[in-house]
Amino acid sequence: MRYLLLLLALVPALLGFSKSIYSFSGPFEQRIIDDQNKSIIYRGHVWAKRPDKALWRYSEPIEKDVYIRGHRVIVIEPDLEQAIIKKINNDIDFFALIASARLVGEETYEADYADQVFTIRLENGIIQSIEYLDPFENSVILSFSDPQQNKMIDDKKFTVNIPKSYDIIKSQ
């Protein structure tokens, strides 16, 4: 779970590659491939805004919204009619992750952080994909289609609305 939260928060953190970048959004595909070469694919849309706001809206194979604001994550799962509220441990410093990123090839960066190596690929200075191995040795590839940087994103996009009928689970 810690690495998933790190990945979910990674896009706003990646905005640190350039201080002139203040927002990022776009459709994404998250492919997880196990050691048997079986894969599962998630699709959705992400919006991120400096300094610490992100919304990951999953549409396939399940619907789910993941809101990130600073060290707090809220996951809204309509199929389960529940919302999970979780604090991210203070030992995860997203800006330290980006500060550790180094150019390893043309528009390719690597960041060593929390015992993980993240490969970040850009095209014309815009993030195209993030790859890493999760703790179970699954290959995780997060690809963006039509990514947008520095487009206006209204702060209302990051307003969490939990239906009153949903169960609320608070986790440490």
Image: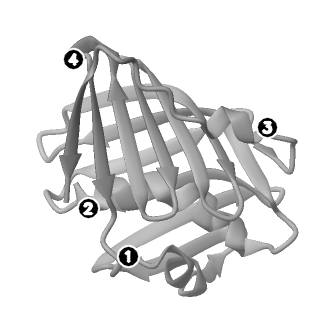
Q: Residue at x 55, y 34 (%)?
A: 28
Element type at mark 1: loop
Q: Nearer the viewer, residue 163 or 21?
A: 163
- Labels 4 and 2: the sequence-earlier one: 2
Looking at the image, do the residues carrying marks 1 and 3 touch, with CB atoms under 8 Å apart? no
Judged by depth in the image, the label closer to the viewer, 4 or 2, is: 4
The image quarter containing residue 144 is top right
Which residue position holds label 2? 2
- Labels 1 and 4: the sequence-earlier one: 4
Of the 4 image quadrants, the one containing the C terminus is bottom left
Q: Callout 2, which amino acid?
A: Arg
Q: Callout 3, which amino acid?
A: Asp
What is the number of the mark on residue 92?
1
Element type at mark 2: helix
Element type at mark 4: helix
Q: Callout 4, which amino acid?
A: Leu
C-alpha separation, residue under disc 1 versus residue under disc 4 = 28 Å
Which residue position holds label 3? 154
Q: Residue at x 39, y 80 (%)?
A: 113
